[in-house]
Amino acid sequence: MNLCGRATNLPELRAKFADDDCEEKSVLSVLGTQWDSDNDTIKIKEFSPTKNFTLHGVLRSVSTFYNVLGLFALLHVQTKLFIQDVHRVHKTWNEQLDAKFAPRWREIENDYIHAGKLKFPRLITNMDSENLDQQFHVCADTSARAIPAVAYLQTHDRKMGTTCVHLNFAKLKIVKPDTYTIPKLELMAIVLAMKVLKFLHTLITRGM
């Protein structure tokens, strides 16, 4: 019985794995993110619809959808705002939610189900290429209810004369209603953007 598993998209390593006592997997799942080593793509674990329409049931379904890279931050913010609105009316975890919230939640569920079918390329650029000029662009904004920050990687190929832009990372925070002014929220958005940039810079300098 194999007590460990490995996955790689390099044929040379796959040949070595065949000689070891470890199972070689084509799809590896880590923290809800699945990597298909055959196609070198990543996807999010499929969403499990809510069985009980309660706050506990909603959170249980959402917790199975781990958004480690922030690729679905826009979807997650809808869920967080939904929970925030519901909690104003329902204070207990196992109380059946009001029927007026059902249509809104069904739309969110459908979005999660479609998101679970999407696939993204794992490798978006070669950081070691001498022909590439690369820049991170971090954008942040705010509203009265949420603060988003998004990082894009712009890659310019001097040899080919082409430029590509890829979504790289996203982070989002929910704001407690009637707590901060818009100028204060804008300053908080700048701080969040700097944290995202520092996080990405740390990963790159470590060679990850």
Image (cartoon, rainbow, N blue to C red):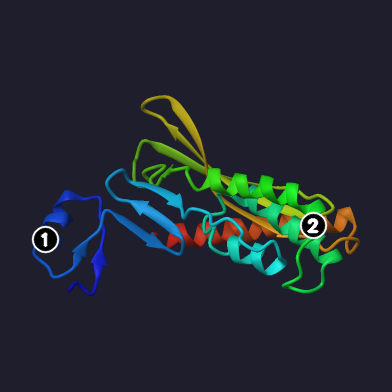
Q: Is residue 76 above or below residue 54?
A: above
Which residue does the numbered mark 2 point to in the structure image?
Answer: 187
Viewer-nearest residue: 117 or 31:
117
Counting residues from the start of the chain, the first of labels 2 and 1 encountered is 1
Q: Residue 151, image x and y in percent?
A: 58, 48
What secondary structure is found at the residue carrying circle 2? helix
Residue 193 to residue 136: above or below: below
Question: Is the C terminus in the top left, top right, bottom left or bottom right quadrant?
Answer: bottom left
Q: Residues within 10 Å of mark 1 (few under 14, many from 20)?
A: few
Q: Position of residue 166 (x, y in %)?
A: 51, 39
- Residue ID at (71%, 65%): 54
Spatial CA distance of label 2 from label 1 is 54 Å
Q: In front: mark 2 or mark 1?
A: 1
The residue depicted at 34 percent of the width and 42 percent of the height is 129
Q: Position of residue 103 (x, y in %)?
A: 74, 47
Residue 18 marker: 1
Identify which amino acid the numbered label 2 is placed on.
Leu
